[in-house]
Structure formats: structure tokens, C-alpha cells
Amino acid sequence: MQVLNFIAGAWQPAGAGAGFEVRNPADETLVAEVPDSTAVDARWAADAAHAAFPAWKARTARERAQVLKRWLALIESHSEELAQLISREQGKPLAEARGEVAYAAGYVEWYAEEAVRASGEIIQPPVNSKRLMVLKEPVGVVAVITPWNFPAAMIARKIAPALAAGCTVVAKPAEDTPLTSLALVKLAEEAGLPAGVLNIVTCSRGHVADVVGVWLADARVRKISFTGSTAVGKLLARDSAATLKKLSLELGGNAPFIVFEDADIAAAVEGLMAAKFRNGGQTCVSPNRVYVHDAVHDRFVDKLAARVGALKVGPASQPDSQIGPMINARAVEKIERHVADALARGARAVTGGRRLEGNYYAPTVLTGATRDMQLSCEETFGPVVPVFRFGDEAEVLQLANDTPFGLAGYFYSNDVRRIWRVASALETGIVGINEGAVAAPSAPFGGVKESGYGREGSHWGLDEYMHTKYLCQGNLG
Ligand code: NAP
């Protein structure tokens, strides 16, 4: 397992020589120690990425695609090791970790294919003596900052389009889950990526502001691609303003999930199970507020409670585990706080509603949820489903949109007119219609409002790493 920083094509410890521990959230056992980098390492990484940029940009798109294809083949041939590593450092059940590796590989494959399709345009000139052309060019050095919930997928879906576009990268993974990112970078090195094109430094939470601060202040870093909380996203937007960097901010959500009276209830329960309990509910597109029409409320809740109550909680090492540990004690405390607040304000736990040992929380269904509860305003990021009752479409749309966030929204209905009305009324970047699993490398993923801006995946995801350059040639006779 690779446990050093990768800078300028060499694996090395932090300049200051310090390290920090990565622990398995299932039982707090030590997984590895990695460098606790500081500003010195961040600057060194930016120097390397800056130096490597002209040559990487000058490669043909086909050559860059070939490196990505070799990286993809290595990810696929190491998929089981990567899945085991994800489960060890992040805690998710092994079946989900395998799914995450395939999902991450899907982005690498997609951008290996898209690299050669980043074409410009020839525009009709206003007079015949001119030619107007548009080129797509890589923005330059990109700083990539990722969260802990999908340690392979979050970094792959940033690095792959950046490299495809011809950018070079400095990356900082989350403190809780740096090992999968280091393993992916090791495979990229083996794929023949030139020195300095991809650099990664790990650091503890105590050093994160210093490390990222170097990149924010460095005018050579032309873009930040960040996935994480809205609070940190706002800090990055503010602190990158001095050098006016291009930003992609994939931030927090507070997804509504609406079950109308004309929905297929069995399908809605299955859709909710898929969307809500992936990664133990620690997913940005997880439904956080479930609105169920009065007429179907009790039937829906009965079916849901039976499914949720049967979920198997346990470590990834047990093959039948469906819900792993939460990432750390802070995460479990937040869930406890949200549930205690909801119960105090009149909610009822139909199943679950309590902390288990260590970092585990019982899968929970709460009924009687209301908009004054903390879990209505903030992401709970855990295996808790609060069910709100509603009476009509206008009321539920008002409730669903009554949040500063706008990442994903879901609804179940079999009325074709309603489907188009609600899909257009939801203020979110992603809408699941009679579907709980929405993400795909070919689709644009991202939010509106305070869930951020920019898109990942699809051809729009490649544009995020490119400038549009306009050329005007005159005097052509
Ligand atoms: P977070 O605290 O914002 O952390 C995300 C990353 O930012 C980590 O690498 C973190 O480092 C770093 N960071 C923390 N403080 C920073 C600072 N002051 N300056 C620069 N970087 C800093 O978010 P999280 O709690 O780990 O992740 C969960 C959040 O991510 C949720 O809100 C979730 O909805 C969101 N998310 C969004 C998407 C999406 O696509 N929209 C996808 C997944 C997750 P440390 O690890 O060292 O703190």
C-alpha cells in the first residue's frame, strides 16, 4: 500500500517529516500512517504541476486518452484490492465498495473517450475576409479537494476530466480516507503518467487550511474542483477571489423525496431504500426529507419500516452487512442530535432511533417530521428517514423547495402531466423520477442554489477544465 505523498513523480514523506493515522471506522484499528503535509509540500506540488503543464498540454488528445485507458485497465485489474481498501478506511460494505470502484472506473473510461472529442468550432464570419474560430484549451493547474464518503469516485471524477483536458493536478484527499486516493495515483504512475502531471499530498484536519491556502493564493493554480460541505465551499469561493480562479463546487444537499398518492408504492419504497441507505446514508444525494401523501402515508410507512428494520448492520468484514459504521464519532453525534431534536419536537421512531456500539447507528424511520426540526434544514448524513405528511402538490413543492440547497430531488408518480410539472418545479440540479439511483458517468452531476455550481460527468464535466479561446483571422482578401 502506498503511504507517501506523490510529488514531481516521486513518492516522499512530508517535508516536516510528520504523519497522521488512518483508522478503520468499524473498530478503530490502525490501517496506515500517511504524511501530515504542510504549506511546503503544497507549494512543491504546485511547482511540479506548473512545470509539467506545457508538455502535458502539448500531447495530442489521443495520447492523453491512451494514458487514461492504461489507468482504467490497471484500476480494473486491481479492483478487488481497491474495494477492500475503501471498506477498510471508509467502512462501507464490500459489495458497495466494489460498486464504487466500478463507478470510479466508469468516469476514467468516459473521459478517456471524451478527451478526443473536445473540439472547437468554426463560426460564420460577419464579412468574407475574416475567419472566426473557437478553440478549447486546458485551464492549467487544477487543485482537487475531495471528501471521505466516496474515496475512489470523488477523486476519479475530477482527475480523469482534468487529465483528459490537458490540465495538471495537485490533489488533497480527505483526512479520514487518503489511502484509496494514494492507491489510485500509484496506478496512474504505473500507467505512464509523466512526472508532475498528477501530484497528491495528504494532511490532517489541523493542516488543511495551510495546504489548501497555498493553492488558493497561488496565481498559477487556475482552477479549484471541490466536493464537500457548503461551508467549506463558500470559504474556497471567497479565498480564491483574489486570483479569480475557475471553480467547480459540488456541495451539500438536502434532497426531498416525494411520494404522491398516484405512485407505485412498492417501487417508491425500493427507490427510497436504494437512494437513502447507500453508504449508510452518507451520500450527498441521499433523500433527507421524505414527503408522503396523506392517502398513502400509512401503507408506505408500514412497508418502509419492514424493509428498514431488516437491514443488517455490521462491519465490511461480515459479508452480509448492508449498513457499515458511520465515518467517525462526530458523524454519529450529529445523527444523535438530529434524532433527539426530532423526538423532542413530536416525531415518533417507528424503527431504530438509537445509537449502537462504536460508530454504528440503527437504521431509523421517524414519522411526524415537521419543518421546524433540525433534520428538515440540514443534511443528517446517516441512516435516518424522516417522513413528513402532505396534502396536495402545491404544498409539497413549496416544502421541497424551502431550503437553501438544491442538489438532488426525487418523486414518485404515475400521472404524466404531474411528472412534467413537478420535474420542472423542483429547484435541484438532479431529479429522479420514479427512480432512486440517478448517477452515471455520462450524466451531468451537480447542484443549484447553495449546493454549488459546475457539473461532473458527461461532456459538460470536461468543459469545466477548459477555456474557450476565440481566434479571429482577418485580411483574407
Ligand atoms: P468538508 O468538511 O467540506 O470536507 C471536504 C474536503 O475539504 C476534505 O478534503 C476536507 O479536509 C477539506 N477541508 C475541510 N476544511 C477545509 C478548509 N478550511 N479549507 C480547505 N479545505 C478544507 O466535507 P465532508 O464533511 O468531509 O463531506 C461531506 C459533505 O460533502 C456533505 O455536505 C456532502 O453533501 C458533500 N458532498 C457533496 C457531493 C456532491 O457531488 N455535491 C458529493 C459528496 C459529498 P479534511 O478531511 O481534512 O477535513
Image (cartoon, helix red, strand yellow):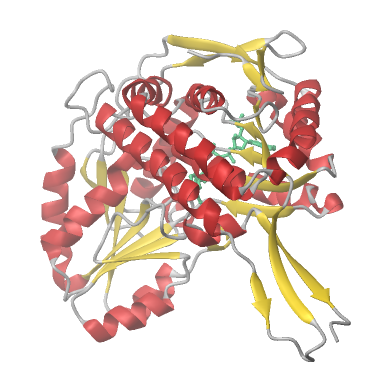
Q: Nearer the viewer, residue 5 or 348?
A: 5
Residue at (52%, 22%) from the top-left corner?
A: 190
Q: Nearer the viewer, residue 391 or 7?
A: 7
Q: Nearer the viewer, residue 467 or 475?
A: 475
Q: Quadrant of ligand 1?
A: top right
Q: Position of residue 31 (x, y in %)?
A: 45, 12
Residue at (71%, 24%) from the top-left corner?
A: 207
Relative to 185, 7 lies left or right: right
Residue 211 in sight in this render: yes
**Does residue 170 sit above or below 142 in this rendering?**
above
Quarter of the rendering occupied by the C terminus: bottom right
Relative to 416, 377 lies left or right: right
Count of numbered marks:
0
**Does residue 133 sit above or below 74 in this rendering?**
below
Q: Position of residue 386 (x, y in %)?
A: 31, 53
Which residue is at the far front? 477
**Does residue 277 sit above or below 320 in this rendering?**
below
Relative to 368, 187 lies left or right: right
Q: Position of residue 383 (x, y in %)?
A: 32, 41
Q: Position of residue 414 (x, y in %)?
A: 18, 76
Which residue is at the far right? 475
Residue 227 in sight in this render: no
Residue at (58%, 59%) from the top-left corner?
A: 118
Which residue is at the far bottom? 127
Q: Nearer the viewer, residue 378 or 134?
A: 134
